Image: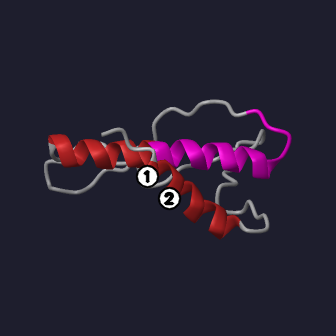
Amino acid sequence: MTDKGDSVIKYRTGEYIFQDSDSAAYVEAYRKFVISKTVNADLSLSKGAMSFRPLDFKLWNPEKIDISKTVKFIGKSSFEMRMEETIRALKVE
């Protein structure tokens, strides 16, 4: 937050993902994003408000173009829902 109460969106430094296809890279990046989002939500519940909250992720190709919104594969929406359900179910109590 700024001193005027405006939200600031900042992307953290990325990491390299090497896969045979854009779809496979998307699956790995989305998995990491969902884990980060789930852990953050769990910490927020137990510790209170967090200063960092994952909202989105970017997936850059070798030409430095974000392809996270353009990667398409059959069953993408159902994959995303299953991934979130699976990771939420892995919570350690």
Percent of width and height locating residue 81: 56, 64
In the visual, does 27 lie left or right of 20?
left
In the visual, does 7 lie left or right of 67?
left
- Residue at x-position 76% and y-position 46%: 24
Image position of 38 with respect to 62: above or below: below
The crowding category of the residue bearing disc 2, from other C-alpha atoms within 10 Å (few below 14, some 14 to 19, many at least 20), is few
Percent of width and height locating residue 71: 74, 60
What stretch of residues is rendered in magenta?
Answer: 18-35
Residue 38 covered by magenta stretch: no
Which colour scheme appears in the figure?
secondary structure
Circle 2 residue? 85
Percent of width and height locating residue 44: 23, 46
- Residue at x-position 15% and y-position 45%: 48
Q: Is residue 1 visible?
A: no
Of 42 and 57, the residue lying toward us = 42
Q: Quadrant of residue 68?
A: bottom right
Q: Is residue 78 visible?
A: yes
In the visual, does 37 lie left or right of 2?
right
Q: Main secondary structure of the magenta part?
A: helix
Q: Quadrant of residue 47?
A: top left
Of 29 and 87, the residue lying toward us = 87
Of 56 and 91, the residue lying toward us = 91
Q: Are marks 1 and 2 in contact (CB under 8 Å)?
A: yes
Q: Which residue type does callout 1 highlight?
A: Arg
Question: Residue 43 — which label?
Answer: none
The crowding category of the residue bearing disc 1, from other C-alpha atoms within 10 Å (few below 14, some 14 to 19, many at least 20), is some
- Residue at x-position 13% and y-position 48%: 3
Circle 1 residue? 88
